[in-house]
Image (cartoon, grey):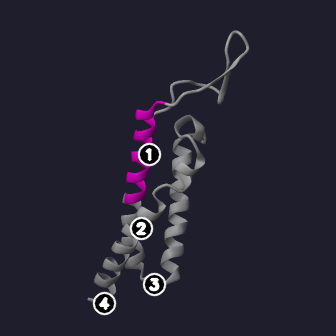
Amino acid sequence: MAGHSGSGSSDKKSSNGVNELLTFNAENMQSNMKIIYYSRTFLSIIDGVVAGILGFTGLKGFVFYALLMAFTSLGLVAKAKFSIHTYFDSWNRVLIDGFLGGLMSFVLFWTFAYDIAHIF
């Protein structure tokens, strides 16, 4: 993952004692968001296939998706070495972004795999 242009804490003291805010590189931030989006989409597809093969129906499937997305968020935070503000501007970027887009892929592949494994 690409970091911001500075290092250290969120505020930096200059030689004259004035706090300077760290700036984020927009290209690095966009690259990090793409990685999160692609990771969530790929894992949603895999999770949907697994849920369909295991035969989850109704609320069990959605709980399965929520748990696996929570583990995905934890994995992304661990990948960032638990220093979220080094790579992203807020926690919402890691925890929430891509959740609904991944849900659509999950449901599509969940029903597809369930139909193939249990109906046909």
Q: Which mark is first along the chain, 1 or 4? A: 1
Instruction: Rate crowding at label 3 as few (under 14), some (14 to 19) or many (20 or more) other CA atoms within 10 Å.
Output: few
The x and y percentages for residue 117 are 31, 83
Question: Is residue 39 rendered to the left or right of residue 88?
Answer: left
Alpha carbon distance from label 4 to label 3: 13 Å
Looking at the image, is 37 positioned above or below residue 59? above
Q: Which residues are magenta?
A: 25-41
- Residue kind at label 2, given as amino acid type: Asp
Q: What secondary structure is marked by label 2?
A: helix
Mark identifier at residue 47: 2
Seen at 49% across and 55% down, the residue is 97
Which numbered mark, 4 or 1, is in the foreground of this view? 1
Tell me whether the residue at label 4 lies in contact with that at label 3, contact meaning CB atoms closer than 8 angstroms: no
Residue 1 appears in the figure: no
The x and y percentages for residue 56 are 45, 81
The quadrant of the rendering that contains the C terminus is bottom left
- Residue kind at label 1, given as amino acid type: Met
